[in-house]
Amino acid sequence: MEINIKIGIKGSENKTVSFDDTATKYGSGLVEVFASPAMIAIMEKTCMNSVMPYLPEGFGTVGTKVNIVHTKATPVGMKVICKSELIEVDRKRLVFEVIANDENGEIGRGQHERFIIEIEKFTNNI
């Protein structure tokens, strides 16, 4: 089956930072601020959701690479907005540019790579 996904697809997701999103909860730090793993998770979700409408039924994507910097702390209760743009398509490999901001400005950015999979076939092979 041919899948036709074009460069330029954009996505956006947001969330309000809760205590479940903090570095102390994740075990990745000692301060109750937005954890880097939580930021990366919303970045991956943004990229995944941006291309889902363009995939045939039974297909999805899996994350394979992140190259992200987390440059600023975000406190509990503040809103985080993540935006993505598909910048490269190589057959089933998708590369996204991602940027996360809180209400005070940029908190992280980088690139994320995903691969298109046929979900049933993929899950049967793990």
Image: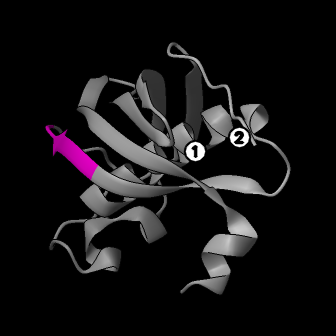
Q: Nearer the viewer, residue 25 or 83?
A: 83
For the residues labelled 2 and 1, say whether their Cβ atoms are less than 8 Å apart.
yes
User: Which element type, helix, strand or loop, lies under badge 2?
Assistant: helix
Question: Eyeballing the image, is 6 above or below 91?
Answer: above
Question: Eyeballing the image, is 59 above or below 111?
Answer: below
Q: Main secondary structure of the magenta part?
A: strand
Q: Amino acid at mark 2?
A: Met
> Horizontal placement of 72 versus 125: left or right?
left
x, y (%) of residue 24?
27, 75
Question: Eyeballing the image, is 100 above or below 57?
Answer: above
Residue that protrudes farthest toward the right in the picture: 57
Check disc 2 and report the residue beneath it: 52
Local crowd at mark 2 within 10 Å, few (<14), some, or many (≥20)?
A: some
User: Which element type, helix, strand or loop, lies under badge 1?
Assistant: helix
Q: How far apart are labels 2 and 1 at the CA level?
A: 6 Å
Q: Amino acid at mark 1?
A: Met
Give the image quarter of residue 26.
Answer: bottom left
Residue 23 covered by magenta stretch: no
The residue located at (50%, 16%) in the rendering is 7
Local crowd at mark 1 within 10 Å, few (<14), some, or many (≥20)?
A: many
> Horizontal placement of 32 versus 58: left or right?
left
Q: Nearer the viewer, residue 112 or 121?
A: 121
Check disc 1 and report the residue beneath it: 48
x, y (%) of residue 94?
44, 36
Q: Nearer the viewer, residue 51 or 11?
A: 51
Give the image quarter of residue 68.
Answer: top left
Residue range corresponding to the magenta coloring: 66-71
The residue located at (85%, 50%) in the rendering is 57
The residue located at (48%, 50%) in the rendering is 115
> Horizontal placement of 29 versus 38: left or right?
left
